[in-house]
Structures are given as structure tokens and as C-alpha cells.
Image: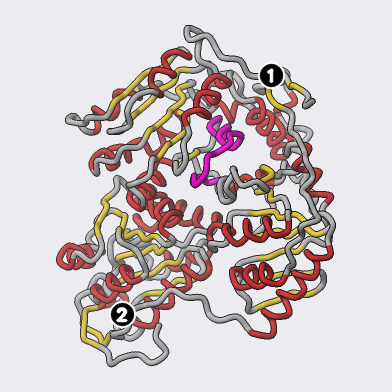
Amino acid sequence: MSSNPRPGQRMTIGDFLLRRLEEAGIRHLFGVPGDYNLTLLQQLHDTGTVKWIGTTGELVASYAADGYARLNGLGALLVTNGVGALSAINGVGGSYSEHVPVICICGSIPLRSIDRGLGMHHTMADGSFDHFLDAYARVTVARARITPRNATTEIDRLILTAWREKRPVYMELPSDIAYLEIEAPADPLVLAEPPSDRERLRSCIAAVAARLSAATSPAILVDADADRFGVASELMELAAKLHAPVAVINAAKSVIDETFPHYLGIYGGKASEPHVRDVVESSDCLLSVGYRPIEVTTGDFTASLPSDAIHARGHSVDVADENYQAVTLKAVLRGVIDAVPIDSKRTQRHVVAPVVASTQPDGFAKLTQAAYWQAIQSYLRPGDVLYVDNGTSFALLGLKLPTDCTFVGSINWGSIGYSVGALLGALTAAPHRRHLLFLGDGSFQVTAQELSTILHHDHKPVIFLINNGGYTIERGYIGKTEPYNDIANWSYADLPKVFRPDTSARSFVVQTVGDLQNVLATPNDTMIFVESIMDPHDAPAAIIGSSNKGAELDYGPRGPQQRKDLQLRPALPTLIEPA
């Protein structure tokens, strides 16, 4: 906001909120209409300030706002009190876990009813109206009930907090105040970081630059916050100046351009390729950015970062025993880039990873996971947006992405069905890019209905669905042949026509390698829906191996995974040793 604000103007609270969303770069609002939010929806319709994207449910709206924010920088959804807020809370919790800035707006109980203690529907009918503010306290960084007295300050505070902290916020807008007029600031909302403390910034830059300059084997490790805080280009510039290798956590797939000469690969402890693990763990100055270790990002806690690693976060940095507060990540990195000398003597260690043997499969052969992902690797092109859901589609993490690709996945939160809603959101944010969704039948069934919204808006993604009869990734934990991991079989390829009878979408059912190769040659001038039939027990070795280890971690030594033939086990790949 301007330091010298201009005189205010009279406008309604709802119009002011919509204006602020637009000024923050939010052009679309996802959600479901309900009687408590209809006043704001009518204002949205009347002003045309923000475009409404109605979804089939609040859960999917929260996923869509998350996907939108990942490509746009900030996203928002609109729900109604209680039933809508609680339906959306899973997706908002995911945004909190994944550090995605989302604004959840809840049309709520009239202030009149709150003041008078009047019982209302969509409440717990116990006289309290704070239950949902309390529920959101654990999955947001800020929350507030808007009133005519606090509207201007709280709306600005919540939007700025979401953007600065890269996490969701929750605001309740009582249904009887949206049309009330307030004195609103005339100056636009400006999304900007507060300036760093000058001394702390200088000292932090000097400490980080000194460590990196003195190192003989510096390296950089990147988590998803490098994307959220927009510093990927600075990290690559720093790596190029230092001739330092850059590894990423799986949650940060595509954050560093995988064609970048100093890109190393994915680090996850013992789950890493040996050369990646060696470089990261033996570095005498590891700069980690946003690193948050959990079992799925550390190879089941086998990651071992150097004890003196530098840990940089969005607004603070740890260097040895010193913690630097009141600094911003971008400012620190820009200063470090300027401070470190170009090292023309150091050369990056040349390492060669083992190569998995591959052959050109017979076109008439039954489609397997190995042949499937080999074909997908060849299908990728620069600029693609790639989505993955929980399941065997995590094999996408093992593919090498062309330049300017964006990877979208719920790695930390791991909510199945996330990717379909996220696809809608990101398609809305960036319709000019090619969007490829990879998921299994189990994940798809959770949010399949949102395909109708994607078709309604004439989006043209390519959807790759693996039909293998259930939760294959769970079969790797326990239940290899148990019925609880089975799901009803749908005619998946028919669904675009079911959801939109006049659709021009092209649907295919693929059973052989040749079938898939033919489909991949299809023009992408409309939606393409590919249903690939696969064996329920065929899965990438790395995915099933991870599930096996996960069972040991989750269930302990007395767990049912110890029983014979209760787990799906991976086949070992054939390796070609580097020359």
C-alpha cells in the first residue's frame, strides 16, 4: 500500500473485497454458490471485476485455487458457512502443507444473527458462531471475520499475509454486510515484501558469501519454497557463478530447469541416485533453500545433510550458530550473487548415473508401466505443465523434463484426487500452455466430476489415466490381492461424452504399446482422454519399493506386512554400468 494514501472513496464492502482481489492479480474465483455467499456473487456478476468459475464441490474448488495459485502467484475460492467451509478445509490444509498462498472466503452467518444469538442453518446449532474460524486456525496463517469496522484493514492484512507467507488465509464475510458502504482507500493494493533490516541483510550476505567462496565443493539443495518465493533464477545464476551442482527435493521437481548444466537430480537420501547423494552429503558448503524433511522427501528419513549446511527460508537464514531474521530470500541471494567471485578454476565433478536398460517395445505387446513411461518421456515438450496424483504416476518424478516445464503435485500433503481440481485451476491461470494430467483410476474417482467443469470451459488438456483396477500404490503397503484395494471399474474413456454430450474431446482406450504410440501422435486441438489398461500388479519398482518401506515405517515390526504375499513387490531393473 502507498505510504501517502490518497483520500478514500465510498464503496460497498463486497466491491472493495473484489477490487482488492483484482489488484492482487486474482482474475478468477472458484467455488460453489450458497445462500450466505450469494450477495458477494451478485456483486461479482454485476461488476465483472473477477470471473466466477463454479465447481462441482468445495473440496475441488480448494484444489483448483491451489493449482491456480501455483501458476498465478495467488488464488482464491468462495464457500458458504459450515458445510462449504468444512468441505474445503482438506484442500486448504494441503495449501498450508505445500506453502501455496490461497484466500478462502466464506460467506457466513449474518452479523445480525451473531449479535442476537439467533440459531441459523449450516451451524452446529449450539449458539456459537466461531467453530469454523477455530477450525481454520490450524490450516491458515491468518483468519478474521469481516465487519464494517475492520473491513479495509483486515481484507488488506489477509491478502498481504497470504502472499508474503505463501500460505492460505481464511476470511468470513457475513451475508448482511456485503452491500454496506465504507470509506475505502483509493490507492491500489501493492504486493511487496517489507524491506529487510539493513544490518541483518548485510551481515547475512557476508556470512553466506564467505562460506560459499571458501568452499571447495559447494552445492545447492532446493525445496519447493524456491518456486513459491520466486528465486529459481537467482539460484541458477549463483550455481553458474560458483560452478556448483544443484539438486532438488522431489517436491521441487521442475523448479530448477532440468536442462541447466549444473542440475544434478532429485535428492532423497538412500532413494537418490548414488552420484546425487554423494555430491549433496559430501559438500563442504551446502546451501539448502526451504528444506523441510518428511519421510516422502528424505527416502524414509535416510537423508543426511552436512551438519554445517546453510538453511535459507523465505524470511530468515541460518548460518552456523547465527540466525538472521528480517531478511528476504530474494534480497539475500541477489546480494550473495554480487558478493561471491566467479570461480573459473573450480569445475563441477563429472559424474555419470547408471542407465536403466531400455529397448524399443513391440507395438503389439501388452502395455506395461515400463513401456508407458518410456513413451511419455518422448511425448514431453518445453513449456508443459505436468500434474501427478498419488499412485504409480509418481513415476513422472523419474523422467527428465524439457525446459520451462512446471510440475504440479501434492507431495507433502498427498491428498488423492488433488490433481483433477488443480488441473482446472492451473488451466484457468495459464490456458496458453499445454497441460498433461497423469493419474490412476483410484485417484480419479475421488474428483472425476470436475472433468465436467474443465469441458464446460473448453479447456484442452491431455489426460493420461491408468486403469489397473484399484489402489496399486496401496497394494505395495499391504493388500496385494485384498478386495479393499479394488474399486469399481468405470468406462473412463466414455466420461467426456457423459459430462458434455456435444464435446469434441477425443477419447481412447489403450491396451498395447502400438495403441499408445498412435494416440501420442494425435493433434492436441481439443481435450485428449487416454485410458490405459494395465495389470493391477504391474508398477514401477521405485514406487512399490517406497510403499514397502512405508509399510515398515507405518506399521512397525508386528505389522501385517510381515505376512507372506500380502505386499506387492517390485521387480529389479537391469542396470548398465557407465563406461
User: Label 1 vs label 2: CA separation?
Assistant: 65 Å
Q: What residue does disc 1 label?
A: 571
Q: Quadrant of the C terminus?
A: top right
Q: Amino acid at mark 1?
A: Ala
Asked which colour scheme the image uses, the reply is: secondary structure
User: Measuring 49% from the left and 47% from the top, which residue is drawn there?
Assistant: 404
Residue at the far left: name it: 46
Q: Amino acid at mark 2?
A: Asp
Q: Is residue 567 left or right of residue 159?
A: right
Which residue is at a point 29% across and 48% down the rendered structure image?
55
569 left or right, relative to 36? right
Q: Is residue 394 magenta?
A: yes
Q: Is residue 408 visible?
A: no
- Residue under the image location 77 percent in, 73 percent down: 207
Q: What's the magenta region?
A: 392-411
Which numbered dot is residue 115? 2
Q: Give the quadrant of residue 539.
A: top right
Residue furthest to the top in view is: 364
- Which one is earlier in the sequence, the residue at label 1 or at label 2? 2
